[in-house]
Structure formats: C-alpha cells, structure tokens
Amino acid sequence: MAVLLRDQFRIGLQTHQKAFADLRKQLRAQSFIALWGKRLALGPSGTWSFIDDGAPLSGADALLIALDPHLMVLRDGFALPGISEEGQLDLFSLPSVHGRLQAKPTARQPPTRRAS
C-alpha cells in the first residue's frame, strides 16, 4: 500500500509513518481471506478503514484502494488461498484427508481389514 501511495499518488510516506503503523496493526488483526472484496480507505486524519465493495460510500472524503488486485499478487506469489465460500483456511489441505484421493494398497502390503 505504501508503494502504491508513493508511486501513483505521490504521497510522502515519512509524514504518514504513524498511519502505516496503525494499518499494519489492523492488517495483522484481519484474516487474509476476510480482506477479499474490500476496499481500504485512508481518511484525511490518517485513519484507515476497511469497506465492503458493495457498501455505499459515506459523504466524508477518503482515498479508496481496491484490495483484490493486491491480494491476487500476494496469493499468486506466496501460494495463498483466494476467496472461498467458507471464508476459512483448511487446517489439513491434503486430498486424502478430504476423501478425494484413496490410498491404494501396495503389492507388498495387503489391505487391512477390521474385525467386527
């Protein structure tokens, strides 16, 4: 966000150090998945807020930044998940845990059977 504000909007970053420290705290309190579909608003007093994409804008002045394009870069660069219907990361993402892949018995090991 800092590079975007510096390069595209020519905003001096030194004067906004406290605002970026506050943003860092807010981002650490947010789930990566919860940020999808949100915009980041920088108010004139240096306060940050997260706004849903479909939410109506208030009458107050603010600089709005769409987060999805930036989240896509992070997702692709760090193999992070995109938006999901569940809104939660899988604790175990192994296909065999989810039943999508059945382990096949090897020739050396016969399949085990349970006795009733």
Image (cartoon, helix red, strand yellow):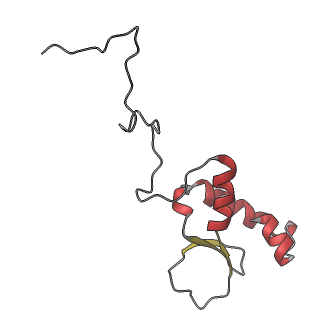
Residue occupying the far bottom of the picture: 59
Task: Report which quarter residue 37 is drawn in.
Answer: bottom right
Asked if residue 2 lies left or right of residue 50, the reply is right
Q: Is residue 46 above or below residue 83?
A: below
Q: Position of residue 39 (x, y in %)?
A: 61, 73
6 sits left or right of 93 in the view = right
Identify the image quadrant of residue 109: top left
Q: Where is residue 9 in the image (x, y as percent from the top left)?
A: 82, 77
Between residue 24 and residue 6, name the one nearer to us: 6
In the rendered image, the vertical position of residue 25 relative to residue 15, given as above or below: above
Which quarter of the rendering shows the C terminus? top left
In the picture, residue 51 is in which quadrant? bottom right
Total label count?
0
Name the residue at 45% across, 44% down.
90
Residue 24, compared with residue 111, is above or below; it is below
Residue at x 70%, y 50% (from the top left corner): 77
**In the picture, which quadrant includes the N terminus?**
bottom right
Q: Residue lying furthest front in this view? A: 107
Q: Position of residue 56 (x, y in %)?
A: 52, 86
Q: Is residue 81 left or right of residue 18?
A: left
Question: In front here: 53 or 25?
Answer: 53
